[in-house]
Amino acid sequence: MDLQLRGKRAIITGGGAGIGRAIATELAREGVRVAVTGRRPDVLKEAAAEIEADTGQSVLAVAADTGSDESVQAMVAEVVGSFGGVDILANVASENPAQPGGPSYVHATDEQFTRQLNVKVLGYLRTTRAVAPYLIEQRWGRIINVSGIGVRRTGPVINSVRNAGVTALSKSLADELGPHGVNVTVLYPGHTLSNTYEQRLSAEAAERGLPLGEYLATIDTGTAIGRFVRPEEIGWVAAFLASPKSITISGDVITVGGGFLGGTYY
């Protein structure tokens, strides 16, 4: 399928690693001019170079912290100055989430909550405020907000609250921006085999004297596909949502967790 993305311009926050990098890579493969942003300049530069080598597309790396409005405004200005505009915003940036099992509401501090909400929920709002005027002016745009399946499952309370916040924010944005030709969607990843998670599982496998692949086969992911989802598989879905062909999807959630067993959602 031709996604009609060639020549479009995209900003991917949290684009230096994991799901953000996978989305950036897939968009670049489709001919999109991509800017990856994040708080670690060295990671961004390495990611940009590797995406360029993989796709043949030049990639812009711009350091920015979504926890700061000043930083977000400067980043968007730099991207627009380089690209001449922007068409697609993929919000992926977040603080490292609490690991399964903690912290519970008893141990979740005000500081942890504030930072998580500031970087992810308010961060997505900041980037949208900075990018939306360009999308409205051209009467076309796509905004993809990465939340998480934690919004539907009990677990670390911070994860549930921040992900629910992203979903509520996205629906409000979709209703407001829809009349201007801008679609807003939400992705719910689940157990995703990012580099960081894979490294952790590799260490666990080594402790048990097992090859990683063999160890992964012993883990029950609770999904219909029976395995972990890889970041690039989420990137495929995001590329479609970023395209003109996703016109009928806005304000909605797309779950990309491999089909969690047991739940029915209407």
Image: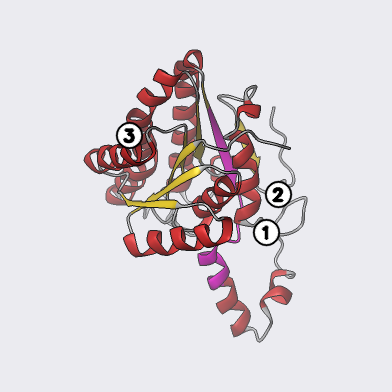
What mark, if any, has residue 258 been given in the picture? Answer: 2
Tell me which corner region of the image, top left, top right, bottom left or bottom right, holds residue 135: top left
Front: mark 3 or 1: 3
Question: Extreme left residue here?
Answer: 70
Q: Which mark is residue 40?
A: none
Question: At 36% from the left edge and 32% from the top edge, which residue is drawn?
Answer: 125
Q: Is residue 209 magenta?
A: no
Element class at badge 3: helix
Q: Is residue 193 above or below residue 33?
A: below
Q: Are marks 2 and 1 in contact (CB under 8 Å)?
A: yes
Q: Which residue is mark 1?
A: 228
The Cα atoms of the two marked residues, 3 and 1, are separated by: 32 Å
Task: Nearest to the eye among marks 2 and 3: give it.
Answer: 3
Q: Amino acid at mark 2?
A: Gly
Does 125 sit above or below residue 57? above
Which contiguous range is marked in magenta?
A: 184-200
Local secondary structure at mark 2: loop
For the residues marked 2 and 3, what is the alpha-carbon distance in whole angstroms?
30 Å
Q: Residues within 10 Å of mark 2 (few under 14, many from 20)?
A: many
Residue at 46% from the left image edge and 52% from the top image edge: 58
Residue 64 appears in view: yes
Amino acid type of the residue that numbered disc 3 sits on in the rendered structure? Arg
Residue sitting at x 39%, y 43%: 120
